[in-house]
Structure formats: C-alpha cells, structure tokens
Amino acid sequence: MPARGPEPQPRGAVIRGNHPIDQAEAAKRFMAAPDHLAMHDQRLWDLRQKRDRQKDQIEEWEDLRQLASDIKTHTLTHLDTYLEMFEKNAKANGVHVHWAKDAADHNAIVLDILRSKNATRLIKSKSMLTEECGFREYAAEHGIEVVETDLGERIQQLDDEAPSHVVVPAVHKLRTDVAAVFAKTMGTDPNDSDVIHLAAHQRNHTRPLILSADAGMTGCNYAVAETGSVVVCTNEGNADLSANTTGLHIVSAGIEKIIPRLEDAAVFVRMLSRSALGSPITQYTSHFRGPRKGGEMHIIFVDNGRTDRLGLEKFWTSLKCIRCGACMNTCPVFRRSGGLSYGATYAGPIGLIIDPTFNRHKYSTLPFSSTMNGSCTNVCPVKINIHEQIAGWRQVLAENHEIPAFKKSMMKAAGMLLASPRLYRASLPLADSALRHLPRFIVYNRMNTWTRGREMPHVPKETFHQWYKKNRGRNGKKS
C-alpha cells in the first residue's frame, strides 16, 4: 500500500457576500482532517495549560484581573477625555494624530500619507485592526506593496489567507503546509519541512524587502494618554523593524486601546503574554513616543463601530479585550474547528460577541457556535463576561428574526416544554422509550443536528426524578 502523502490543509468558511456564515460546514471540513485537527487541538490546549501554570505562580493574579478590568471600565467610560489627552501629548511629541470613523476612512488616510512620501512599499507588523479594515487588499488595489514582517502573518499573506488566531496567525497549519506555501511562492524544496530551514528561507526572502521599504506600519497594544506614546508587544522584534527601518512610522489603533497612565501599562504587560502564550512577558515590549530624528510618526485612531458598541448596554464591555487569544485557546469549539471556519476577522468566543456588532446578519450564526461552558470568561484577563454576552446575542438575534425558522420553531417548542415541569416530566419517559425502540435512521437524520457529530447518550432505565421520588421522596422508603 503506497504511503500517504501530507494531509491537505482544510480551507476556511465559504464567504457568499452578505449571506450568514456557515461555520458548521467549515468546521466539519476541518474536523475531517485528522492530522490538522489533532495538532490544532493539542497546540492550543498546550497554550492554555502554560497559561494556567503562569497564573498559578502569581498569588495576586485575580487581583490583577480585577485591576485590569477596572482600568478598562474607567477608561471606556471616560474615553473622550483620554483620547483628547493623548492627542494633545502626542502632538507635543511631534506626532501627527488622525481620526478615522470607519475602515474606509482609515485606509484612505494611510494612502494619503504614503502618497505624500511617494512610498510604494510598506512593511507592517501584526495588526488585527488592519485586518479588520481590509487594508492589505485596499493597498494592493492602489499600487502599494504591503510586506508582513511577523512570521505567521507572512505565511498567511503568502497563502492568501486571513490569520486564524489573534496571536498565532498560522497555528492551523502543519509544517508540510508551510513548506508547500513557500515552495509555491519562494521556489523552495516542497519536501523540506524542517522548521529551522523554513524560518531561514522566509527571513532570507523577506529581509531585502524590509530593507528597501519606503514606510513602516505597526499596530498598537496600548496607547498611553499621559505620555502620548504607544506600546507594542511582539516576540520577533518585527514592530521595531517596521517602526525604525524607513523613517516613516504609521500606527493603526482602535480607540479602545487607550489607557490613562504609563503605570497602567505595567498591569496589562504582566497579563498579556501569560494569558496568550503562557510566557512571563513578550520578547519585545516597545515604547514609541515620537518620530525618529528626521522622520515622521503618524497615529490613526479608528472607530469603525466602536462608539456604537460602547452604547450597547449588554455588550460594551467587549471593548475591554486586549487581544490575548486566551478564550480561543480554551474554547473546545475553536480548538476543534479552526479559526478560519468563523469567516470573520475575530474568531473564537471573543469573535462571537464582536462580529455581530459589525454585521448582525452575516455573523448571525456565530453566537450559536459555543457550548456555553464559561471557560472563556474564566480565563479572560480583563474579566469580560463572554459566555453571558454570547447568550445575550442569541436572544437579540432571535428577537430580530436572524435565526433560521426551523431552529426558531424548535427553540420555541423547547421553551414551552422546559417551562412546564409537569409536561417535561411526562415527556421524558416517552422520549426515553422512543430512543430505545425507534430505528436508528429515524433518530440519526439530517433534521436532528445533535446527532450529526455525536452519538446519543445511553438511555437510563429511569429518570432522575423517578429515582428521587422512589428513594428520597415523601413516600419513598428512605427519609
């Protein structure tokens, strides 16, 4: 029997305009690739375990979580004050500050800056905001070459894919996948999947592009109002390359990234890498306060729906997110379906509560891609009540008729059943009897979504209520 070749990488969700994302279909394809499924699940669970070990070494961990949450609450409820303070102090540092109401505005501002300097090649460190804005595609349409300097982002760029995770963008790929991408785009040996060789090939291929770039762009982990400076955390030093190589540094920052004081940054720096990767701190924690001598620094603050989200009573605290990915690493659905199955910039539990704020219809299915186990909330370093917000979005979507009619009718029937103790208790023996005696094809069919990926549990001889009434009830033999 011939040896099996490398398993092809499953692709992400099929995007069909504004139609609701079919996350379940994409997840099914990912789960049908056993090598990718096992690697992805194990890798992310390993990050979760490393996070737990780091947390256990810090006695004041829960105090830090509460402090981080309180800082974010204070800042978001005084957002205008701190944004104005940042602008004043940044301008005093010689920084140009811009305001973008949406993604299109952000992209146009960047293009204007680049054209004013006749820049045609931009090097960029990892930034989820620029992914959210679709900046790379926009730049290509206007003759600007964008080169990602983060290894994971560069792999995804060369493969024409979005990042699948906010911290480890290519975590869904096997080494053989990366070897195939590099062979196609760099002409390397497709059979050489040694990670050291792959990293070296990428470095040798990309470094000349970096050194000949005209402009650099970074994201922003924290924008400090007190100093008018930005803090960027990386493990590869690519933010420093992007900020310092060219003399023109552009920073893209969501308005929620603001924090009041420099000492507040210390709280988040302690939390970020421990929550994300299970390491004490990122290799590089870079502070950018002003332009290099003879250079320029621009900061673009982007709203893109954040102000509207701030006005949502149930969901505004999602703006506290520091993009650590801890909720993704612990989520059983994300670990087994891959981030690209969500068809959105933000995947996993945090994506379930952020994405509908961008497009309620397109992402109407995502809040149902959760087991509601609450682990995401338990690991969130800023104490966002993620699982409660997921439940809240389900309610909003149901009230606004954004769920399929069949699911809505099933949920309505389940609600009637669960609201009546007498009806519920009477139905259980009937259901148990049916499961014991009905032919398998009736129970396991396309209409029963529960049985598509799992077996029904073993039917007990009696319900708990029947057992309790017999053994612990008023008329039972035991008191």
Image (tube, grey):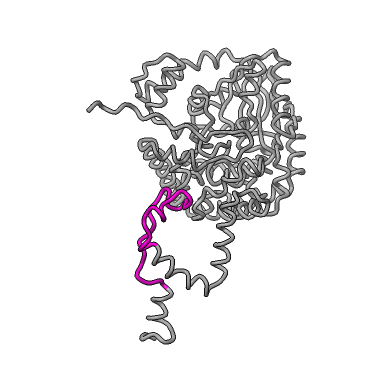
Q: Is residue 448 left or right of residue 79?
A: left
Q: Is residue 479 above or below residue 303?
A: below
Q: Nearer the viewer, residue 46 or 285?
A: 46
Magenta segment includes 214 = no
Q: Quadrant of residue 298?
A: top right
Task: Look at the image and say whether residue 439 sits in the magenta stretch.
Answer: yes
Vertical placement of residue 307 versus 94, above or below: below
Residue 211 is situated, as x and y percent measured from the top left of the image, at 55, 14
Secondary structure mostly seen in the magenta stretch: loop
The image shows a total of numbered marks equal to: 0
From the top left corner, tell me how far across and down residue 390 is, in percent.
Answer: 58, 52
Magenta stretch bounds: 435-464
Tell me if residue 71 can be seen: no
Q: Foreground residue, 53 or 339? A: 339
Q: Classify the position of the N terminus by image quarter.
A: top left
Q: Is residue 87 above or below residue 297?
A: below
